[in-house]
Image (cartoon, rainbow, N blue to C red):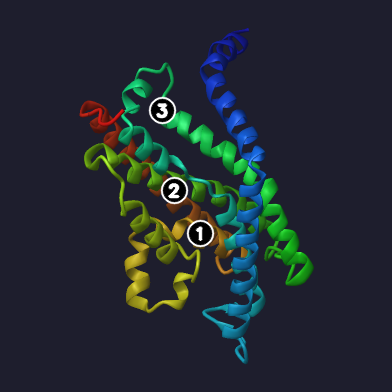
Amino acid sequence: MADRLHFTAFWPRILPYVYVMRLKLLVSLAYRFDVITTLVTNVILLVGTVFLWRTAYRDLGTVAAVNESQMITYAVLAVALRSFFTCNVESTLNDRIREGNIAMDLIKPVHLIGLWLSEDIGSACSAVTLRTVPILLVSCLFFTIPAPADLPSFLLFLPAVLLSYALLWMLSVLTGLMTFWTMELGGLQNVKGVLVDILSGALVPMWFFPGWFQNIAKLLPFQHIYQTPLAIYIGRISPGNALDAIGLQVVWSLILILATRGLWMQACRRTMVQGG
């Protein structure tokens, strides 16, 4: 009875976020032209990436303990993950602050960060069906079936992906919150995007970079966004070591959550309305 009463009291609190997630999912499904253009773009990126790595591995057996088949699987899944890792919170924050609507948002009876997270999760759910699945089908039909190294690697890959999205989303929130001080995000969003592309292993894994560059990258959370789950999937990180890698993802997630919480509290204290 106590558990039932607890659930009854808890459900109304999360209901608005579930509704927003569902609404964003439906809205994302409605814009068919945007879905088609994004899908075509991702397929072109997939084709270019696969042929790039096939050329790079020509006459080579194994590079950095990764063979051509593993690298192609890595590249395919990197494109697939990028297709549904939706983080619109930066643009949302920038627009709400620039237009002066953030003051009205702050008096709403919901937590804004949770609301924006619900919106992005809804968009990501629609992207899985409309973008990620077609990309994987194209890969299976024309290139390779992106199979995991083994079952334990696949099972460990799943929580690693969830933590990867959490890291990317929290970095996006931290970037967007800077708008409270700058009043315009400007090129900061592009800087964050470039850092993620280069340091996360989304385009080129860190093990192809010089040793000194890898040592610097290890001190940052970026490589745990793409490289960690993908390396687990293809077997470059063994199941035993994968638990340590996932543990680092958890640590970085907690650090970014605390940083976001602190910056959010500071931002709310100095909210300034500008524009309409």
Disc 1 element: loop
| Left or right: 90 as drawn, with respect to 242 | left
Q: Is residue 230 above or below residue 174?
A: below
Question: Residue 198 appears in which quarter of the rendering?
Answer: bottom left
Percent coordinates x, y for residue 234 in the rendering: 62, 66
Can you say which quadrant of the picture contains the C terminus?
top left
Residue pointed to by mark 2: 167
Label located before the other in sequence (3 or 1): 3
Q: Amino acid at mark 3?
A: Leu
How many numbered circles are shown? 3
Q: Amino acid at mark 1?
A: Tyr
Percent coordinates x, y for residue 56 in the rendering: 57, 84
Residue positioned most to the bottom? 59
| Left or right: 121 as drawn, with respect to 211 | right
Inter-mark Cα distance, 3 to 1: 27 Å
Residue at the spot 45% in from the left edge and 51% down from the top edge: 249
Dot 1 surroundings within 10 Å: few (below 14), some, or many (20 or more)? many
Label located before the other in sequence (2 or 1): 2
Q: Nearer the viewer, mark 3 or mark 1?
A: 3
Residue pointed to by mark 1: 226
Residue 67 appears in the picture as rendered: no
Disc 2 element: helix
Residue at the spot 46% in from the left edge and 74% down from the top edge: 207
Residue in the foreground of this view, choosing between 53 and 39 = 39
Residue pointed to by mark 3: 112
Inter-mark Cα distance, 3 to 2: 18 Å
Question: Residue 194 appears in which quarter of the rendering?
Answer: bottom left
Dot 2 surroundings within 10 Å: few (below 14), some, or many (20 or more)? many
Label located before the other in sequence (3 or 2): 3
Percent coordinates x, y for residue 114 in the rendering: 45, 30
Disc 3 element: helix
Can you say which quadrant of the picture contains the N terminus?
top right
